[in-house]
Amino acid sequence: MPRRLAVTGMHEASVLEYEDVPLGENDVLVRTEIASGKHGTTFAMFDGRNFEGKRYDSERRLFIDSDDAGWGRRPSPEEPWGTGTSGYGVVEAVGAGVTRFAVGDTVVGLMDIRETNVVHEDWLWDPGELDPLIALCMEPAQVSIHCVRDSNIRYGDRVAVIGLGALGLLAVSIAKAAGAETLVAVDFLPKRRAMAQMYGADHTLDPGDGDVALAIRDLTGGKGVDVCIELTGVYPGLSTAISSVRFNGTICSAGFYQGEAHTLFLGREWHMNNLTMIVPNGCGGWHETRGYPHWNNRRVGDAILSMMRQERLKAQGLINRVYEGLDDATGVFQHIIDAPDELIKFAVDLRG
């Protein structure tokens, strides 16, 4: 039987066997060669406070009281979570209605970390000659591109990005390509700040060195940035973003915040400075974009891969740890806890 890397407990990953689901009319069976995960969301899900006693009603788009654990259900060997978000591999079979791909094609797209993936053809792309470790970054880039597009960042704008995980670093690269005149990147971890400079940041700030909002004011002639993209997923980060933008500025809130907000003082800059806050597409699921139908999810993926091929979207070094096989990867969560500056984004090579 094929095997997968699954979340089977709090901060625990195990190798499990599975059976592929039947191939649907528009499905593609992919023999996975290398796959990647996005651990920030997984760590937020471990917290789980948002879902205690609540269930999300997808029709009314509202959290309602419920005894059903739903998304708040803890992972276990009997009810494991997936570990992957993107995969790269070769097509082994296609459903009768598939038109984009044929057996033998190389594809990249939304996949789990498992030896085979059954994926609807709409969520697969041709990576061309891209390095697999670059192509795998297309999934987090689908959030980062919307951070920039949905915030309406324009040529010459002053921009800050708070939180330099995979999403934040890609947002730095995309904001630079979009024409940010002053680009400030903020994170506690020095290697991530150094990578942000490689990706185009003009200034990097360590929150441990002092008041970030005040430092951003000093870098922008006392005004603040036009747009601040917040990707820490913690309330102090969001509070800093609110304090860092100019009057009539925009906050892009893309973090997955957990629990009740005790540290936001919304009677301060939020109340005084006539601010706008948006949540970008890609947060909370893959909705159609704000630019639909001219910009749909298919076009977004096409654009990301095109910009990667042109080296206008930088993702080199973003996947900075590759595990050799599933068994080697079972310690990934502990590695992240022990040395967060050593692991930005991980992948598992399944070709051995």
Image (cartoon, rainbow, N blue to C red):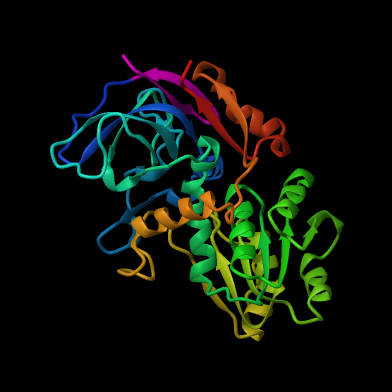
Q: Residue at x 64, y 67 (%)?
A: 264
Q: Is residue 138 magenta?
A: no
Q: Residue at x 46, y 50 (%)?
A: 305
Query: Among all residues in the image, which is located at the extreme right?
Result: 209
From where the camera sits, is residue 284 visible?
Answer: no
Q: Quadrant of residue 185?
A: bottom right
Nearer to me, 28 or 104: 104
Q: Quadrant of residue 346?
A: top right
Nearer to me, 246 or 62: 246
Q: Residue at x 49, y 42 (%)?
A: 135
Q: Is residue 10 magenta?
A: yes
Where 9 sits versus 214, above or below?
above
Nearer to me, 18 or 235: 18
Q: Which residues are magenta?
A: 1-17
Where 336 sits versus 196, above or below?
above
Residue 329, percent across and down? 55, 23
Count of marks, rendered view:
0
